Image (spheres, helix red, strand yellow):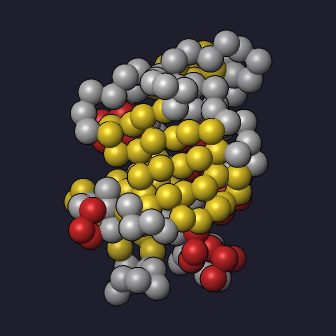
């Protein structure tokens, strides 16, 4: 597990080891940018996990510098590693469905974070992304650093306008 500590604090979020009672997530105070539903053990409302931007920014962040099939040149994506986010909500499944504001959706294995470096990006070249420009979130892969991700399989999983993940 990414966070194999029985109870380690980071940015106000309590990470709990498997087998330990799950503490609820803090309530979102700002505009909700991501909902995580399905087979999760840590929630903060109606059995789901709701994140505002500040909650995502409080989690460990990583950057990916990569080209994409949809943008020109190298760009820097900043966000939460997918595996860290799944650990935070206590995901208990094997796949997640990523849903976009434009009605697009794609399924991906939960281990895409550890195996392929998937990231839930909230910054594009240091700037927040607007829904009119692929935001507020973009599930992205390090295409330049991981040649195995330069295939149609991973391109369809790179969901922009991301607003929801459902764990199964």
- Residue drawn at point x = 70 percent, y = 52 percent: 95
Q: Is residue 145 shown to the viewer in this render? A: no
x then y, percent, for residue 161 = 38, 62
- Residue drawn at point x = 39 percent, y = 67 percent: 102
84 is higher (above) or lower (below) than 14: below
107 is higher (above) or lower (below) than 49: below
103 is higher (above) or lower (below) than 96: below
- Residue drawn at point x = 70 percent, y = 45 percent: 168
x then y, percent, for residue 13 = 46, 23
Q: How many marks?
A: 0
| Direction from residue 163 to residue 20 in the image, left or right | right
| Direction from residue 43 to residue 91 in the image, left or right | right
62 is higher (above) or lower (below) than 26: below
Image quarter hosting the N terminus: top right
Q: Nearer the viewer, residue 166 or 11?
A: 166
- Residue drawn at point x = 38 percent, y = 56 percent: 137
x then y, percent, for residue 6 = 67, 16
Quadrant of the rendered image containing residue 8: top right
Q: Is residue 93 shown to the viewer in this render? A: yes
Q: Nearer the viewer, residue 135 or 123?
A: 135
x then y, percent, for residue 41 = 64, 26
Quadrant of the rendered image containing residue 133: bottom left
| Direction from residue 48 to residue 39 in the image, left or right | right
């Amino acid at each position: 597990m990414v966070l194999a500590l029985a109870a380690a604090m980071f940015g106000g979020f309590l990470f709990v080891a498997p087998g330990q009672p799950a503490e609820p997530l803090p309530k979102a105070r700002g505009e909700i940018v991501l909902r995580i539903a399905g087979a999760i053990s840590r929630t903060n409302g109606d059995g789901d996990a709701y994140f505002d931007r500040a909650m995502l920014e409080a989690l460990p962040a990583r950057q990916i510098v990569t080209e994409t099939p949809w943008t020109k040149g190298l760009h820097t994506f900043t966000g939460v590693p997918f595996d860290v986010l799944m650990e935070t909500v206590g995901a208990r499944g094997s796949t997640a469905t990523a849903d976009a504001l434009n009605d697009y959706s794609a399924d991906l294995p939960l281990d895409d974070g550890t195996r392929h470096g998937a990231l839930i990006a909230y910054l594009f070249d240091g700037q927040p992304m607007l829904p009119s420009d692929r935001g507020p979130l973009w599930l992205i892969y390090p295409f330049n650093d991981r040649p195995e991700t330069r295939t149609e399989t991973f391109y369809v999983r790179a969901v922009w306008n991301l607003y929801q993940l459902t764990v199964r």
